[in-house]
């Protein structure tokens, strides 16, 4: 659904501390209510979802509350989706330093999400199973929403006034030219399925393996250029709140973001999720697992059933005034944005690079809180001599790695980093 373009100069960016301060003063002093619903139909039984509305950063401290929701669309079996559902949040939280303020927690969260996704992938691949999964993880703290995703399980935001915005990037080779370039530069081959006689059919796939996605968790049988490094976006809603719709591609292959949002406006979250799934099945039938989680972030003084209401017919003409955003393409390697103003929504952070050096760089705001030889991914403390690995003759050599200006990584995680960049296989144990 296209809207008329109204160009205006973006107002000045606001720091995260200022935005949190606003929430803690006046009418925004109370945290919003979080209401959710989920629905789905199974074709292969490989979709899983995560609902954890009552998490605490600090045990026993209700002021540290946050909520987590996720969708995992498995392929080639369910094991990667189940493993990610059970371990991903724990791995993310292990990368968050203890005893930090709420402001620091929200600032370090995008980096922790990257570390957690990579750790979950490494741990799953050690199991030797061939399954893979998309993963979309949503963390809600007050009116601040942080979304990390690999694959094509999309998350959209619907706010008052009929504004629908995409909070994820689809990592499909067919649709994402930059991901195709990255995969081929790292040693993969991108092409369609070849039939007898040379005829090519179906979507673009990565070979070996034939996967249509460029990022996932698992997929041990596919090249390391299929990476688990997520696109991360963090936004702060206005005090009017909003609705999140998180769903697997069984929904998004059938309906657009705008149609999904319109189908359930003004309805409670549980019913909304059912209607989104119903609309998808009505459009294409049950061709794939179809899973939807709807989350409403509601101002505490609005009651428990509020949700974005249907806008007036002419309100969509004001879309660019209500939700302003940069014209730079989302998900580009190295694309980073902090505190851009959206009108109803403030964008605090966005990064889609597949390079760990750019995602974990040394300039962590909380570097002083982390021991110098704690791996930034697996969170294991080591001493320098443990960074040596045994060669085939029983001697020692330095862990293989290209020059690295990021935070400390153990030898295993450095091998994984190099493999994802096409420099070596993380499964190789021989010293070079």
Image (cartoon, rainbow, N blue to C red):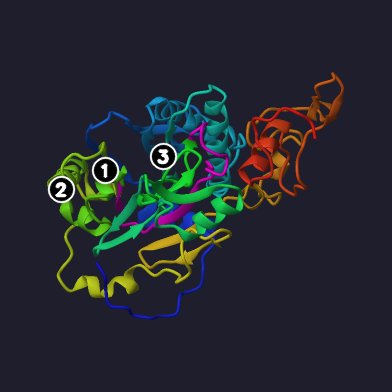
Q: Is residue 183 above or below residue 322?
A: above
Q: Is residue 25 visible?
A: no
> Of discs 2 and 1, which sits in the foreground?
1
Name the residue rendered at 33%, 73% in the picture.
320
Residue 112 in the image: x percent, y percent? 57, 41
- Label 2 belongs to which residue? 279
Other-residue count near label 3 (Cα within 10 Å), few / some / many at <14 / 14–19 / ≥20: many
Name the residue rendered at 15%, 45% in the picture.
275
User: In the rendered image, which quarter contains the C terminus?
Assistant: top right
- The furthest residue to the right: 395
**Corner quadrant of residue 343:** bottom left
The answer to which of marks 2 and 1 sits earlier in the sequence is: 1
Q: Is residue 134 above or below residue 264?
A: above
Residue 10 in the image: x percent, y percent? 45, 75
The answer to which of marks 3 and 1 sits earlier in the sequence is: 3
Q: Which numbered circle lies on residue 250?
A: 1
Write the start and end of the magenta stretch as one range: 218-245
Q: Is residue 384 above or below residue 184?
A: above
Query: Disc 1 on helix, strand or loop?
Result: helix
Q: Which numbered circle lies on residue 134?
A: 3
Name the residue rendered at 39%, 30% in the picture.
76
Residue 263 in the image: x percent, y percent? 16, 53
Residue 255 in the image: x percent, y percent? 22, 53
Residues marked 3 and 1 touching at CB (< 8 Å): no
């Amino acid at each position: 659904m296209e809207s008329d373009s109204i160009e205006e100069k973006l107002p000045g960016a606001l720091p995260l501390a200022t935005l949190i301060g606003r929430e803690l003063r006046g009418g925004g002093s109370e945290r919003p209510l979080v209401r959710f619903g989920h629905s789905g139909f199974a074709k292969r039984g490989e979709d899983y979802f995560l609902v954890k509305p009552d998490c605490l950063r600090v045990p026993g401290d209700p002021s540290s509350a946050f909520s987590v929701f996720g969708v995992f669309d498995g392929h080639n079996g369910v094991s990667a989706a189940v493993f990610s559902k059970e371990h991903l949040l724990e791995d993310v939280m292990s990368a968050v330093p203890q005893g930090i303020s709420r402001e620091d927690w929200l600032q370090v969260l995008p980096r922790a999400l990257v570390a957690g996704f990579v750790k979950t992938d490494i741990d799953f691949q050690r199991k030797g199973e061939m399954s893979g999964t998309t993963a979309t993880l949503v963390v809600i703290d007050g009116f601040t929403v942080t979304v990390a995703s690999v694959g094509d399980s999309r998350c959209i935001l619907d706010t008052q006034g009929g504004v629908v915005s995409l909070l994820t990037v689809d990592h499909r080779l067919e649709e994402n030219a930059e991901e195709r370039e990255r995969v081929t530069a790292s040693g993969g081959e991108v092409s369609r399925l070849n039939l007898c006689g040379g005829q090519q059919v179906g979507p673009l796939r990565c070979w070996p393996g034939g996967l249509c996605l460029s990022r996932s968790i698992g997929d041990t049988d596919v090249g390391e250029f299929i990476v688990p490094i997520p696109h991360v976006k963090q936004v702060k809603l206005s005090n009017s709140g909003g609705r999140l719709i998180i769903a697997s591609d069984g929904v998004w292959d059938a309906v657009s973001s705008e149609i999904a949002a319109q189908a359930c406006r003004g309805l409670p979250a549980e019913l909304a999720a059912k209607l989104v799934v119903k609309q998808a099945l009505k459009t294409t039938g049950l061709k794939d697992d179809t899973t939807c989680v709807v989350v409403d972030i509601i101002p505490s003084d609005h009651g428990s059933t509020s949700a974005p209401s249907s806008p007036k017919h002419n309100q969509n003409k004001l879309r660019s005034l209500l939700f302003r955003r940069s014209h730079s393409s989302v998900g580009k390697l190295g694309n980073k944005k902090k505190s851009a103003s959206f009108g109803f929504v403030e964008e605090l952070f966005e990064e889609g690079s597949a390079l760990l050096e750019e995602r974990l760089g040394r300039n962590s705001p909380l570097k002083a809180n982390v021991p110098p030889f704690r791996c930034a991914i697996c969170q294991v403390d080591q001493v320098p001599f443990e960074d040596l690995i045994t060669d085939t003759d029983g001697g020692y050599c330095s862990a293989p790695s290209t020059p690295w200006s990021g935070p400390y990584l153990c030898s295993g995680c450095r091998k994984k980093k190099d493999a994802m960049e096409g420099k070596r296989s993380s499964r190789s144990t021989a010293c070079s």
